[in-house]
Amino acid sequence: MHMYSHIRTIKLASYISIGGNLALAMLKIVVGFIAGSLAVVGDGLDSLTDIIISLMTLFTAIIIAKPPDREHPYGHSRAETVATSILAFFIFFMGGQLFVSMIEKILMLKAFEMPDPLAVYITIISIVGKYILARTQFALGKKAGSELIIANAKNMQNDMLTSLSVLVGLGFVFLFRVPIVDKILAALIGLWIMYTAVRIFIGIVHEFMEGVEDETLYTRVFEAVRATSGAANPHRTRVRKIGAWYVVDLDVEVDGSLTVNEAHKIAHRIESTIKDSIERIYDVVVHIEPLGNVEERECYGRSPKEGE
């Protein structure tokens, strides 16, 4: 995917999220007031916070679109990583808030009040709407390779699970007269939301520490070298992620009697093969060495000898 296509996809996902959440928020707030349900009104206000998240995503796309400059020679794609970490903290806070509020309600043993049927119907509509939004965000996030959009999709999925727990709880009330079940389910979902946020943040930390989760990237880099005539012994290979893009750095050995121009052509073919076989490559740096060259105190990097 080209950088411009990546940015367009993030913007499209942001616009869909803003429009969908705005429609759900207005619907829940209006119906909540009509039905006299403050819980539904509160759920509508929560959907407004999802709009703020989508606006942050849109703003991030604008930053990413800025070209590289003297201060940021690799571009501004890391803005997406920073925004994803902020979203992870926000999701964790929302999950913690849900968990604590449900525990307080359980301990207070307040009498359960049956909601207006209209409130139940709008909850079902909210679940369906959030499901559609979450699936759309997941699809666009995977297409763009955007952890930010995928994290936003997980946030919407969590909202859907929260609403679903309300419906399941109501079912226990109607069938078994056990009103506390809905609060227990909501508290458990709060824990699940916090767990989801931690997983998102761990992935972000891995990227900040210059690691990549997809180990097959190294295998494909080595295959690209093997497919290039005149190239041998790829080593000191390092792949790092910048936003949705990858930077590949590797050493390759060639016949020491080749001219600089001939060696450069081999390096160029390796670069082209890597870009053709791996999506979202930002840059490839190939360091050419003569066959059998040994460097002392060489920096760490991966090689096929390690089993990739």
Image (cartoon, rainbow, N blue to C red):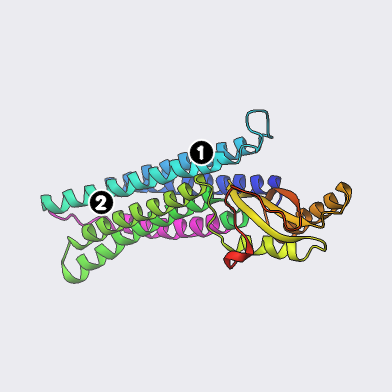
Q: Main secondary structure of the magenta part?
A: helix
Furthest-bottom residue in this view: 175
Q: Residue at x 32, y 58 (%)?
A: 120
The magenta segment is: 111-139
Q: Residue flagged by tag 2: what amino acid is it?
A: Phe
Q: Looking at the picture, how far across and down is residue 222, in whole percent?
A: 68, 62
For marks 2 and 1 on the same chain, the one whose residue lies earlier in the sequence: 1
Q: Is residue 308 above or below residue 119?
A: below
Instruction: Name which quarter of the figure residue 223 lies in.
Output: bottom right
In percent of width and height, residue 96 lies at 29, 47
The image shows residue 126 at horizontal and vertical percentages of 41, 55
Amino acid at circle 1: Met
In this figure, which residue is indicated by the disc labeled 2? 99
Residue 78 lies, with reference to residue 258, above or below; the image says above
Q: Label 1, on which residue?
A: 56
- The residue lying at 61 percent from left, 37 percent from top is 76
